[in-house]
Every structure is written in C-alpha cells, then in structure tokens.
Image: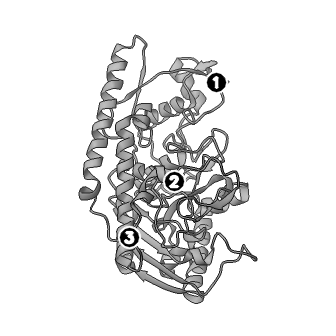
Amino acid sequence: MTSSADYKPPATAADAAAAATGSGTSNSTMASPQQQQQHQIHNQLSSGAQAPHSPNLGARIASVMIMGLTGVISRTFLYGLNDIEVKGLDRFKQLLDSREDPERRERGLLTVSNHISVLDDPVVWGVLPFSYAFNPNNLRWTLAAHDICFANPTFSAFFTAGQVLPCHRLKHSQHGGLFQPALTQAIRLLSAQPFTQPGFSPAPLTSPVTSSQTPSAVDIPDPFTVGTLTYSTTGFDSHPSPSIYTSNRHSWVHVFPEGLVHQHPQVDLRYFKWGVARLILESEPAPDVVPMFIDGTQQVMNEERGFPRFLPRIGKKIRVAFGEVVDYEATFGDLRRRWRQEVERVSREEEAAAAKSKELVERKPRLLGDLPEQLKYSEEAQQIRIECARRMREQVLKVRRELGGYEESDPAFGEASTWAPDRKVKAEKYKSRVDGSEINQD
C-alpha cells in the first residue's frame, strides 16, 4: 500500500518537454502545459508506476474529523430541531454498505437532486446514521462555488477536507463552464485508474505554443493523472488531487444540476445543466445513478429571510426521498451508445489527420474527461447531453411524484430557453420573471 508520503512523482513538465524535444532544457516554443503533462502520464503508464493508495495521515484525520462532525451536527439539527420525513433510506443504506470496501467496488455512485437551499449540502446527509459519518471513503464528493468556498486558504483547506471540488461559475470566473477541471475530477472519481478513454486510439501531440502565453481554459494542465498530488483550476491555483488515490476509486459524487438554489412554491425543478450528462456518459464504467428529492430546507434558509439572516430557522417540516437505482440501460443506454459512436467518429478523424500530417507527432492515450474540441461542441454531442440531462431531470421528478403532495411539473420548466437570463435586470437579487422565485446572483 502506497501513501502520498511514499509516492515518487514522475518527471516535471519541463523535463517532459525537454525529453519530447530531445534537448536538456525547454525551448520558448514547446508543447502546451496540457500536452506536456499528457506526455508525463504516457511515460508513467509505460513505466508501470503505481499511484498512491491514500493521502497522508494528517489529511485523512482532517477529513474524518470534518466529515464526521459535520454529519453529527447535521443529524442533530434534522432530528433534534426539525420534523424530518425520509423515504427510501433503508434501500440507500444497503447500497452504501455494499460499497464500504473501495477495493470491491465495481462502479461509481452518482446521486442527483433538486437544489432548494444553501443548506441542502451538508444538512440532508444528516439522514444517515452516525455510524456512517466518520467514514469519508464511503461519503459523497460534491462541487461548490470556487469564489465562495475556496476564496481563501482557510476555506479551501476546510472544504477540501470536506470532500468538495472547486467549481467556477461563469458569472464570476472565465474558468467556468462545462469543461472545467472540477467536472473532469468528478468523472474520474466515479471511475478507476488507469483513466484511459474507451473509443480513442492514441491521439497526436501537436499545436506548439510559446511558454509566455497566459494559461487558458484549453491549456490548463491535466491535473489528475500526471503523477502529481495537486491540480489547478486556473493554471495558477493549486488544490489536492483526490482522484490520483486508488482508495478513491469508484467514489460517490453528488450534484445539483439546476446549478443554483431554486425556491419554487411547489418545489418544481428548473432545467438541468449539461454537466450531469458528462458524469453519466463519460464515467467508466457507467455509474449507479440514484435520483433524490428534497423539500423543506427552503423554509430553514429561505432566500427572503430577514434578520438574523445567517441563522437557520428551526421547527420546519423537511422531506428527503431516495429513489431506486436507475435502470441505466433502459434510461441512458441508447445515449451512451450514441456517445461512443461520436467518440469513435472523432477518433477516426484524428487518426486520418495524423496520417496526413507531415510532422513527426508523439502518440498519447486519450484520458477520461480529456475531450477534443469536436466532442465538446459538435451538434451530436450537444444533443446527446441535452437529452441525457432531460431524462435525469425526469428521474428526479419521478421521485417527487412518488413522494406525493405536489402539482405536476410545468413542462416549460425543463427547457433551458425558459430560464434565459433577463439582461434588463441589473440587481444582484430579484424575482424570477418565470415563476416568481428569488434569484440570487451573488
């Protein structure tokens, strides 16, 4: 068993670049940082280097304490100060119990729910018994706003130990969007090493850039499989890289695909953003997908609450429902096949382009989450993601319907066009023109 304290990473990016150019020093014109680090992982895979099993002892203790105490506080709050109703918990606990040993897991676990309060995570996980709270290896990873939860080193350390990934929001950062490192990280946490991507032959290493260029969304180094223990979301920041540890294979990831808090009077759902489709379609193998539905936490932390605004309200009725594991083949099987076909089409085009090229190119494996431009923006890829997100939303609505007590969802709410931003509104907080819910753009 290898811990991070024992792990010896491969050569640096500069060394890799020098090796690729056949010189002892790097040139002003070289492969981009993304390409340099892809070269590193190619060398690592070829040499048989082993990834570390787990973080160092200090990091493990911090995670146990933060996850454990948060779980205890959340459970005490739910069951001691509120009226809690939970459906499907026994079935979900059985699923978690079957995943307790990371070495025996065969696939990742993806839970997906609506988002009605800033307290949804971590408070809803208080429904799990105390015995689950101090075992971070069998608890969720999630994504949270980089500009809030990772705004300073103290926050960053706390939320990292709490198994949170830094997600950039486009309103606040040029590094946001569907293809940012946090989503690549989530895909790989749901998967297992080695992170080679099915359907791709090794792709060419081309497109040299000057070393003086500012890192951008397209050449941020691939952080997760280059043998380093940290990764960057901007090209300048640094965060511990959990997917490199084999103890995190086939992890549990939870997401809120609405992308923001939505407090509708009938707890209806906005459209689901496409990031959830990437997790469903690109993880290897396909994850177990469990839809969830939450109600009541919007009364605990209502967006229109007055003084004292920072304090949660108590004595509220809270409902949490866990659906059954989705029949993946029946629900997403055709979309996954279409996605594979699109991957194979792009792979063939890359091979044909490489064959026509007169330049000597280096070959490398295509890694999970590492998508060429065609797979990011082709019409077929976009249509697959739209349909996958729509079907996932229907699964959450199914749990809402089974829980009972709600009006049927408005079909228009599932369309992205319905929620197009109102460019005329300049205020940070305002009432939605669609359903009157409070919009908070902070």
In the picture provided, is 59 more to the left or to the right than 226?
right
N-terminal label among 3 and 2: 3
What percent of the width, then of the height, locates residue 54? 51, 57
Measured from the top left, where is residue 345 in percent x and y?
30, 31
Q: 296 and 70: which one is in front?
A: 296
Q: Position of residue 322 (x, y in %)?
A: 39, 73
Mark 1–mark 2 Cα distance, whole angstroms, equals: 41 Å
The residue beneath circle 1 is 211
Mark 2, Cα crowd under 10 Å, few <14 / some 14-19 / many 20+, is: some
Q: Type of residue at label 1? A: Ser
The residue wearing badge 2 is 419
Examine the image and state in which quarter residue 57 appears: bottom right
- Does label 1 or label 2 sit earlier along the sequence? 1
Amino acid beneath label 2: Trp
**Secondary structure at numbered mark 1:** loop
Q: Distance between the residues labelled 3 and 1?
A: 56 Å
Q: What residue type is labelled 3?
A: Glu
Q: Give the label on residue 82, or none.
A: none
Residue that protrudes farthest toward the right in the picture: 307
Label annotation for residue 408: 3
The kind of secondary structure element at disc 3 is loop
Q: Quadrant of the C terminus?
A: bottom right
Disc on the earlier residue, 3 or 1: 1
Q: Observer-nearest residue: 341 or 101?
A: 341
Count neighbours of disc 3 (C-alpha within 10 A) and say few if under 14, some if 14 to 19, many if 20 or more: few
SS label for mark 2: helix
Q: Residue at x 60, y 44 (%)?
A: 233
Q: Tally the marks.
A: 3
* Above or below for 438 versus 283: below
* As drawn, 219 above or below 256: above
